[in-house]
Image: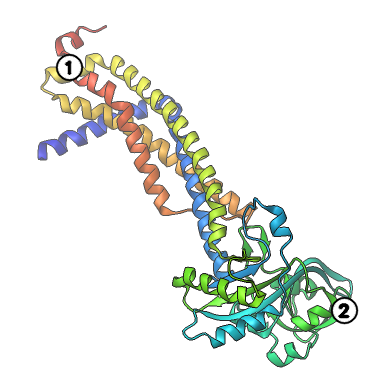
Amino acid sequence: MKRFLYEFAECFRIAWAQIRANKLRSILTALGVIIGIVAVTLMGTAIRGIDVGFQNSLAMLGEDVIYVQKWPWGPVEDWWNYNNRPNIRTTYADGLNRIITGTPNSLLDVAVPVATRGSSIKVGDAKVTGVFTIGTTADYARLNAAEYQEGRLFNDAEANAGREVCVLGFDVAEALYPGRSSLGQTVLVNGHPFTVVGVFAKQGEFLGLFSFDNQAVLPLPAFAKYFSTRGQGVELRVKVRDKTRMTEAKEELIGAMRRVRGQQPGERDNFSVNEQEAFKAQLDPVKQGIAMAGLFITGLSLFVGAIGIMNITFVSVKERTKEIGTRKALGARRRSILMQFLIEAVSICLIGGAAGMVVSFLLFLGIRSGAPNFPVEFSPDLVIVSMFVAVVTGIVSGFAPAWGASRLDPVVALRYE
C-alpha cells in the first residue's frame, strides 16, 4: 500500500508538470469538457429551480385546496362539451358547506366561493392597471396562508353586509402609497371607492408568470355590485382536512358537487375538479424538454472533449516514448505508466470541470441579477455530479492511450526517434 501511494504521488507530480509545461494545449483540450459541464449544470439548475419555484408557489396557493371550475386544467379534446357546461355559481358554496357539515367524518373542511376579474385601482394621479381582483367571503382566510404587511382580511360582518373594503397586494399598495401606510385610505377600484383594511406581505410570483403581489381582495357582495359573478372567472375553492388523502377527498367533493348541481346517476359530470397535481403534469414535459436538450448538448460536448483528450494523450505518449522506455528500464511498473497518463487525462478533465462550474455559477448569478423572478436554483449536488462526470470522462478518454503506453517494450521505446 505504501509503495502504491508513493507511485501515485510521483505519477501525480509528473502529470501536473506535463500539464504546466503545455498550458495552452491543456486549456484548449479541456474546452469540450467545460462546455459539457456548463450544459449539465445549467440543465440541473433550471430543473431544480422549476421544482423549487413550483413548490413555493403551491405553498402560497394552498397544497390542501381543490378547485371546482367549469374547465379542467390542461388540454381538452371535446371542446364543445366543456363550453356548453353550465357556469359555476358562487351560491354553490352554501350548498357544499351544508353537505360538508352534514357528512360525518368528512374529508372536506370548507368551500369558499371565489370570483375574479381584472381591474384598475387609482388614488389621485397614481394608478395600477391589470390588478387581479378577487371577490370572496371571510372564509378565504382559511385557504390563504399569506401573511399581512399590515391590517387584516375583512370579517364575516363586513363581508355579509357588503361593506366596500379591500385588501391590497404588496406591489399595489406600494405603487399607490410609496413609502407610507395605505391602511384606512380610500382607493378607487374601477372608479368605485373602497377602504383599505389590510395589505398582504410580499409573496412573489408563480413561476414568473403571475404575481401574488398584484391583487386586491374584496367582499363578494361588494364585488358583485360592480362586477358580474357569472360566467368565466368564478370557481369554488375547497379546503381538505388531510392533504395526504387528496384522492379520497376529491371523490367526496365530486359526489357532493353532483348533488348540488342536481345531476342524475349516469350523467356525465358537468364541472371539473382540479388540483395542483395537474400543474405538475403540465410541467413534466417542460422539464423533460430541458433535460433532453441539456443531455444532448452535454453528451455531444463531452464526446468531442473526450476525443480531444484521447488525441492529446496519444500525442503525449508519442512525445514521451523515450521517457517511458527509460522509466521502464529503471524498473517502473506498467501500472505506474498507466496511472501517470490516466492522472494526466483526469486532471485535464477536472480543470475543465472546475472552469465549467465557475462559468455556470457566474451565469447563475447573472440570471438571478437580471431576472430575479426567474426560477433558478444552484445546488451543491450539481458540483458533485459535474465533478463525477469530469472524472469519468477523463478515465474513459485516457484509458486507451495510457494502456498503450504501459504496454510499450522498453527496448523499442528507447530506440524511438
Identify which residue is drawn at 54% across, 69% down.
59
105 vs 208, left or right, is left
- Camera-side residue of 98 and 4: 98
Disc 1 marks which amino acid?
Thr
Residue wearing tag 2: 192
333 vs 157, left or right, is left
Residue 152, visible in the rendered structure: no
- Camera-side residue of 89 and 46: 89
- Residue density around tag 1, few if under 14, some if 14–19, many if 20 or more, within 10 Å: some
- Camera-side residue of 270 and 8: 270
Residue wearing tag 1: 326
User: Farthest bottom residue?
Assistant: 157
Q: Is residue 121 above or below residue 184?
A: above
Identify which residue is drawn at 61% across, 73% down.
258
First in sequence: mark 2 or mark 1?
2
The spot of residue 64 in percent (x, y) is 53, 73
Distance, label 2 to label 1, CA atoms, is 94 Å
Q: Is residue 417 above or below residue 28?
A: above
| Quadrant location, the N terminus | top left
